[in-house]
Amino acid sequence: MKTIDSIPTSKIQRASKLVTTGAKIGVNYLKYYGDKFTKSEEEAKEKLNTNNAEDIYNGLQQLKGSALKVAQMLSMEKSVLPRAYVEKFSLSQFSVPPLSPALVVKTFKRYFGKDPNEIYDKFDTVSTNAASIGQVHRAEKNGKKLAVKIQYPGIADSITSDLSMVKPIAVKMFNIRGKDSDRYFKEVESKLVEETNYVLEVEQSIAIVAACKHIPHLNFPNYYADLSSDRIITMDWMNGLHLSEFSTNNQEVSNKLAQALWDFYMFQIHTLKKVHADPHPGNFLVSPENELIVIDFGCMKTIPMDFYTPYFELAKPECINDPVLFEQKLYELEILRER
């Protein structure tokens, strides 16, 4: 895969990339109107979606960070977006062009103050996985195989400006309007700020691993705070296939994995009152022993009791059988709102 030698970091540089992408989309629409004379509407529309998805993704993957994270979020909306967008945007989960080895070393020294070979016994400057916020490298220290996640340069500083640029596109795709749009993007921004804080992620990861390690058929890496910083995380290397790449005809294995995932989320929600809020397939692996591995806790959401209580009261028979009470709970949760 082609590597990247630099990432636009200034607001002007990043805006110009989006303007270029917008120009390509304009050309695609001109081609679409021409294709309607020689192709069916369905064929012309499919070609337009394919070309637009390709150009938007190619533009966002050069920016990385919040802009690419939005594409990652959109890839989960299979019922909303055309298939061409879902297929292309899903690459942002763990398969985007990585930083070049030279830029990796430069970025590591900037964040950690030392060359990676001064920290680890072995360090592979070629990335194994690259996603929207950072990329992962293999390393070894004292005979232990490690995964080192390095955040892309300038990503944390560009969150607000990136979201203001991609918001019009996302609003149209999600059909979010008015005040909902502002609330939605405020939430996205706050979570992205958290997700770029790797010190917080290590703390959250260690806490979740300690709380959930008793769950059957569920595995986690250990995290090493002394080998991590605000933009670098060191953890155990975990062997396995990404959930989206795994398949089996063994129903017993499928049941075991599904049960582990269910138990993981139910324990978080009902006991910890927290939830792993970035559940795309790139954050889950299936081990060679067919057990589930969870590898990323950068985005955790605390569930407030003023949401938890009325939400789960909806499932109680006395609420289901009482239309007035049921509607009251919907308003309390803001699922329904006064116009």
Image (cartoon, grey):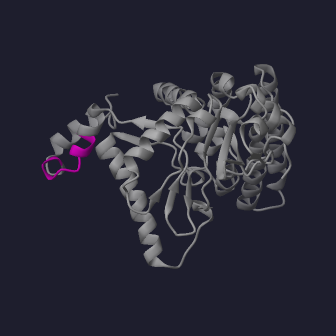
Looking at the picture, does residue 290 appear above or below residue 278?
below
Q: Does residue 290 belong to the magenta stretch?
A: no
Q: Position of residue 141 (x, y in %)?
A: 68, 46
Q: Does residue 316 belong to the magenta stretch?
A: yes
Say left or right for 149 vs 20. Answer: left
Residue ID at (63%, 22%): 160
Q: Position of residue 26 (x, y in %)?
A: 81, 38
- The residue lying toward the viewer, choosing from 293 and 162, is 293
Q: Position of residue 258 (x, y in %)?
A: 43, 64
Q: Which residue lies most toward the front here?
A: 142
- The residue lying toward the viewer, choosing from 24 and 191, is 191
Q: Position of residue 39 (x, y in %)?
A: 80, 61
Number of numbered discs visible in the structure rendering: 0
Residue ID at (76%, 26%): 110
- The residue lying toward the viewer, choosing from 251 and 91, is 251
Task: Write down the region rendered in magenta.
Answer: 310-319
Please identify the quarter of the rendering in which residue 168 is found. top right
Would you say residue 154 is visible in this rendering? no
Would you say residue 270 is visible in this rendering? yes
Looking at the picture, does residue 50 appear above or below residue 258?
above
Majority secondary structure of magenta residues: helix
- The residue lying toward the viewer, choosing from 304 and 272, is 272
Say left or right for 144 vs 248. Answer: right
Please identify the quarter of the rendering in which residue 131 is found. top right
Residue ID at (62%, 53%): 237
Q: Quadrant of the C terminus?
A: top left
Please identify the quarter of the rendering in which residue 211 is found. top left
Looking at the picture, does residue 103 appear above or below residue 193?
below
